[in-house]
Structure formats: C-alpha cells, structure tokens
Amino acid sequence: MFKHYLQHAFRHIRRNLSYTFLNIFGLTLSIASCLIIFLVVRNELGYDTFHRKANRTYRVTMNALDFNPSVSFGIVPAMRNDFPELEEVSQYWHQGDGLLKVGNVRYKERNYALADPQFLKIFDYQWLAGDARTALVEPNTVILTQSIARKYFGDKDPLGQVISWDNRFDLKVTGLIKDVPGNTSMPFDFLISFETVKPDLKAPMAEFYAIGGGNAFIVLPENYTVQQLERKMPAFIEKNWGPQIAAGAKLPLQPLTDIHFDQRYLDQGGIPTTSRSTYWGLGIVAVFILITACINFINMATAQATRRSKEVGVRKVMGANRLQLIRQFLGETAVLVLIALALGIAAAIAFLPVAGRWLDVKISAAELATPSVIGLMIGMTLLVILLAGLYPAFVQSAFRPVISLKGKSGTTSRGLTLRKSLVFIQFAISQILIVGTLVVASQMDYLKNQDLGFNKAAVVSFPVPDSARQEVIRQQLLQDPGVQAFSFSSSPPVYSFSFTDFRSPENGMTQGDVTEVKYIDEQYTDMFGLKMLAGEKITRQHTGDTIRNAVINEAMMHKLNIFDPSVAVGKHVLLINDRYNIIGVVQDFQSESRHKKIRPCILIYRPGAFFMASVRVDMSNMHATMDRIGKTWSGLFPEELFAYEFMDDRIAAMYKQDAKTYTAFKLFSSLAILIGCLGLYGLVAFAAVQRTKEVGIRKVLGASVLDIVVLFSKEFILLIIVAFCIAAPVAYYVMQHWLGNFAYQVHLGGGIFLVAIAASFVIAGITIAYQSLKAGLANPVNSLRIE
C-alpha cells in the first residue's frame, strides 16, 4: 500500500510540475530560512550559556550613581576573605590596545585580557595544549587561542615560545585553546596571567573604594541562592567602604547570561548589548515564513480540488474509504515536504557562510547536526505536513462520488472562502513585515546620519604613548599639507573612558551624580565643531594656575537646575573635592550610542591626560596622508606600532548589533514576502485557467485588457485593504515597543504605514500582472473553443 501511495505521489508531481515547483520552492526557502534564523537566534540568546557553571556565575558590578560593570581590584581579595562559602572568585581585566612582539615582528592587538587562575575554573574553553589548572598561576605567562597562535607561529608548537608585551614583559606561552565562541561577553585572542601586572597595581587602583578597574566574577555554590549573598552585601560594603559611602553604594550581582542584554551599564568592554525581544521578534519572522509557505500549499491544493474530484470519485466507487484517501493526500504532501526539507538543508548549508558574514555571527554548518537542530527539523517537518496537508486531505476526501464524477467538488464556495481568508493572512503578515523593516531602516538611518552634535567627517584618532613628545608631533603633523586640523585629548567625542562624581552645592545640588570627563586642548572645540551656547571655549592653562576652568554640556547644566546657558557661566561644580569654574556651555554632543540619553559631560584642560591625538585629513589624498602620518608617528615612537581609527568606524561599531538586526529583518522579511508572492502567483495562474471561458466571453462582449486585469485584481485589492486594517495596529504596537530600546528614536508616523500599504499594492500588482495580462491578451476564439 505504501509503495502504491508513493508511486501515485510521484505521478501526481509529474503531472503538475508548475504547481509542484511553486510549492517545493516556497517550502525550501522557508525551511532554509527557519534553520538559519534558529541558529542565529540560538547563538544570540545563548550568550555565555556554553559554560557549565553559567547559571551560578555572576559579575560583581558597581551601582553608586550609575551602573558600572567595572569594580576596583580590591573587590576580589575582599570577597575571597569575607565570603569563603563562594565556590570561586575571579579577576578579569579586558584590554583594548597592546603591542605584541614575536621575534622581530610586531603586532598591534585590541582584543585580549588578563585573568587569574580562578578564571579558568569558572569558564570552559576547549584546550588543545597546556594545563588549565596551572597555565595562569605564574607571572609572565600567556594562553593563546588557536587563530592567534597560527598568526604568530604558523604550524610551530606555540608552547614554551616567548612573546614580548608592551616592551615590558616577556610572556611564556603555557596554554593553547580553541578560538573563543562568538557569543561570549568575554572575547579575547589571548589571556595574560594577572600576576604579571599585580605588583604594578598600587593605590588607589587596588583599594576597595577605587572607581573602575576590571571585572569580578563569582560562582555560587550549589543550593546557595543569590538572594542569600545579596542580603550580606550591605554589611560587606560597610566593613570595607565605611558607613558613609555604604549608604549610597551597591554592588549588584549581574547574572552572567544577562550581560549581553543589560543596557544599563556605562560600558560593556566593547561588546554591543541588545534586547532579547529583538531576537524573539526574529524568531516570529521565522514562524511567519513557515506559515506563509503552508498557506501557499493549502491555497494551491484546495484550488486544484476541482481537478482531482473525478479521481476521488473513481477511487471511492472502486471501494476506497475516506481514511485511505486522507492517507494518500497526506502522503503526497509528505513527499513534497521531505523533498523541500532536503533542499532546504542543502540551501541552509550553502548560505550559512554568507549569512554569517552579513549578520556578523560565527555559525558553522556542523551546528545543523546538533540534537536541538535535528529535533527542530523533525518537528518542523511534521508540523508542515499537518498544517499544509491535513485540511486539503479532509476537503478532497470528502467529495461525494456522484457529484465528483460530474467534475464538481461540491465545496467550491467553502474552498474559495478559505483561500481568501488565507490570502488575507498572507497580506497581513507581509504588511507587518514591511512596516517593521521600514521602521528598523528609519531608525538605523537616524542613528548613523542624524546630527551628533560634532563634525565627524574625515577625522582619524590614534594614541600618543609619550606625553613629553606631544608638541613635537603636533608641529610636525600640522606642517603636513594633508592635515587640516589637529587636537589632543583624553578621548574624541565618541570615546567614553572617564566618569566621576559631581556636585554643585551653590546651585542646590548636594547629592552627587555621574558625569563624563574629557580632558581636551584648546583646538578641540573648533576641530570637532562643538557649538558654544554661552561663555568661552577651553583655553591653555598653566600647571600652576589655582583656578580650574571647565566647559559643561547642556545635560550637566540641566542637572544644575539651570536652563539659560548664560546663567551657568560663572557657577561652580565639584568633581569629587576639586572645584571648577564654569567658563562656558557647549551644545550636547553624542559620546555614547543613542540607546542611552546624553549624560552630563565636563571639558577640562589637562595636558597630562592627553592620551589620544585626532586629525582631520584631506580625503582627496587620504592614503598618502595617512602613510606620512604613520611615518612621522613611527619616527617619534620607534618602539611602538602605529594604529589608527576613523571616527566613522567608531560610530559604526556602536551600532554593530543594531546593524545585524536590520540586516536580518531586511533579509528574512524579503524572503517571507517572496514566498507569499509565489503563492499569490500560483493562485492567479490557476484562476486564469479556471476562468478561461469567462475571460473569452467578456472579451467577445467588448471587455478590454485593462478590464480583465481589474477582474483578477479587484478581490485582492479589497483583501489588502482589510488586511492593512488588522496589520497596522499590530505593527504599530510591536515597533513602538522595539523603539523603546532607544533613548532617541524616530517618530512612528503615518507615512511609514502609507508606504507599507502602497508597497503591498505594488507587490501584489506585479505578482498578478503577468498572468492577468496573459489571460487578457489571449485570443477569445481559442478560449471559447475549449470544452
């Protein structure tokens, strides 16, 4: 019997190649898309879950006036001493800039960290060589990842090799691990023993009360709740910090698996955060894609019911019962779905490398063989067979033999109503996806291209290792014809490194708040085009000056309860205990991503804190200019390696995660709409065949080609309008919630929804146009001769 069903299924496929192609192609696209989306969502929502102790691991953070992921280096030894019940306490310190030397070859690295031996007891990595228990115990030791070891040593065994770090330390390679997975909040290319720098961490960095430092991680014992530890933290803070500070300071315990999704913190070590809801939304897009493909199948199967009514009648007369017919039709569906599954898996494997590059995720085809993905494929296959095949099987098996043998199905009206309902659902899904994609695109454009409050065009920044040579490099670079402007600072506008407490008792602000501090020279304001609202710009001050001047931004002015910039000039603020005279107010500028509101910022002249230089270069001959800057810099700092970053690249890095979201939604929403178009095309093609005589009669009676096109289009136009009435409020609610992740966001106005419905009309019109024009241009004599 099974062989008979299989033979009949393939016979039916051969007889209906166009119908089969549309179904298989749509299902293939949907299965491939769902598999890729599943891997992407699992990757993003699975940040740090690959560690065995992830559910018991917490990061100790700081919350006094703001949330800070870094704590002083005094926290870890204090916690080890005061909480002996903790399974592990570890110190981790991510580094963003370092010079490595292997033999005579130098490398500039931006992604490495320091850690103590306990770190390797908390976090799990795949070891290729070395011993995790001892690899970081001694000072001057380093663990390499596989890719960085290959970069430095090729095919040589790296164990025992020596690497020079920052021209100060000779590090011995004591371990080799596989590359760290991409979905981790602690990315690194190599790990240096924390013991290497421990002697250099003198007060105040090693003091308990210091602000900022590294990350502290703890592991709770089994059957020990985080609430138990949190109840002990106030006493711990008071003991080590003193009662005055303990009254307003906390050390929140942040779950390891929440780090990637917690956007409250000042800095996340260069790893952009995101919202879990974003990726749940992408998962919903996958469901939409699958539903759309199933709708296509149901629509075309029920539309073809009249063609198969005689076959059903003959089988019933020959003794087939309804259950046998249901098995037959479900079997045909299963064959199509299994073919689509095989093709979908092949397509997913072929497209994964491309998707990985577009979405900036590390996903390999081997992940398709994991139990969870195999389970998904089995479940998805069964679900599609049931969703796509069950209703058509029941409809077709219910035909009555007498009516069926006359060539009628007896369910035309019901089948037509169902098809219209399903097309309505498709249009609603498409419009929700169109609105979502347009909103994400608008927000991304706003993030990248709206006024940031400063001039970022053609600006390059690079570090200055030795402050004693600042004036030399300034004079030499200003003589370069390709350098249009030059400035020293602790950080350009979009770099945020330094934060501190500020108060202003004279303005009634007795409680402290957090401000960003930027140390800048006298050229900074003009070079970056900062707009002065009142007062004077920062000017050069002598080290012996007793009056400390500062310029504040609007956000700080408002914190002082002042709303007229001219009134703020002459007032004073306290940074910790240092008193600064406000000489000017500058318009707010963006120094962090637009996920967060602009925070208070104070600009101060302090040459000893000028760690970075910024230049505006002539873009007409940019490469030659950068080569000359590099040679000048290397001539002054021969032991270092020149590395620079364009301001545009820095800004793009802020929105790296958002760009991934936009690319994913744009790609998979387009696929969902394409799959819907395939089904709509198949329906119109089938309708054109079914209404061949009607079209011929209408043409004989004087109908134009336009009349025929309108005939095929009008019912779909009505469905688009009704679907829009449902889709618009749903899309508005969902996208308004998504925009809530940003402190600054686009307005969700009616224009986006008008574009969405117009796009729906265009997409449907293009899909319908070919078949309706073909029917309208056909010779009526030929159509009326068909019997």
Image (tube, helix red, strand yellow):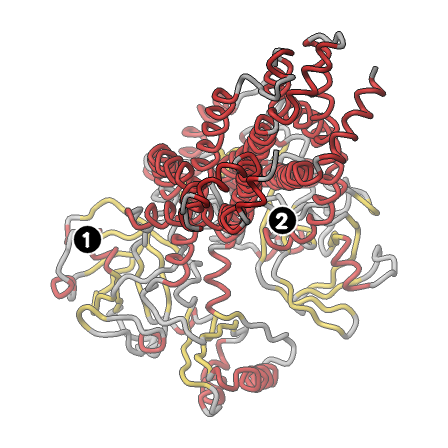
Question: Height in image: 688 above or below 456?
Answer: above
The tag on residue 560 is 1
Name the kind of residue labelled 2 in the image.
Val
- Residue at 33 percent across and 71 percent down: it is 605
- The x and y percentages for residue 350 are 73, 49
Specify the farthest residue to the right.
Answer: 156
- Residue at 24 percent across and 51 percent down: it is 503
- Residue at 18 percent across and 71 percent down: it is 535
* Secondary structure type for disc 2: loop
- Residue at 39 percent across and 48 percent down: it is 439
Q: Earlier in the sequence, mark 1 or mark 2?
A: 2
Q: Is residue 552 left or right of residue 427?
A: left
- The x and y percentages for residue 67 are 40, 43
The tag on residue 579 is none
* Secondary structure type for disc 1: loop
Question: Height in image: 92 above or below 97?
Answer: above
What residue is disc 2 on? 361
Residue in front for this viewpoint, 44 or 86: 44
Residue in front for this viewpoint, 332 or 261: 332
Q: Nearer the viewer, mark 1 or mark 2?
A: 2
Q: Do tag 1 and tag 2 residues touch (Cβ < 8 Å)?
A: no
Quadrant assignment for the C terminus: top right
Quadrant assignment for the N terminus: top right
Residue in front for this viewpoint, 147 or 745: 745
Question: Height in image: 750 above or below 327?
Answer: below
- The x and y percentages for residue 496 are 42, 59
Q: Quadrant of residue 190?
A: bottom right
Question: Height in image: 377 above or below 634?
Answer: above
- The x and y percentages for residue 259 are 52, 40
Name the kind of residue labelled 1 in the image.
Leu
Label 2 neighbourhood size at 10 Å, few (<14), some (14-19), many (20+)? some
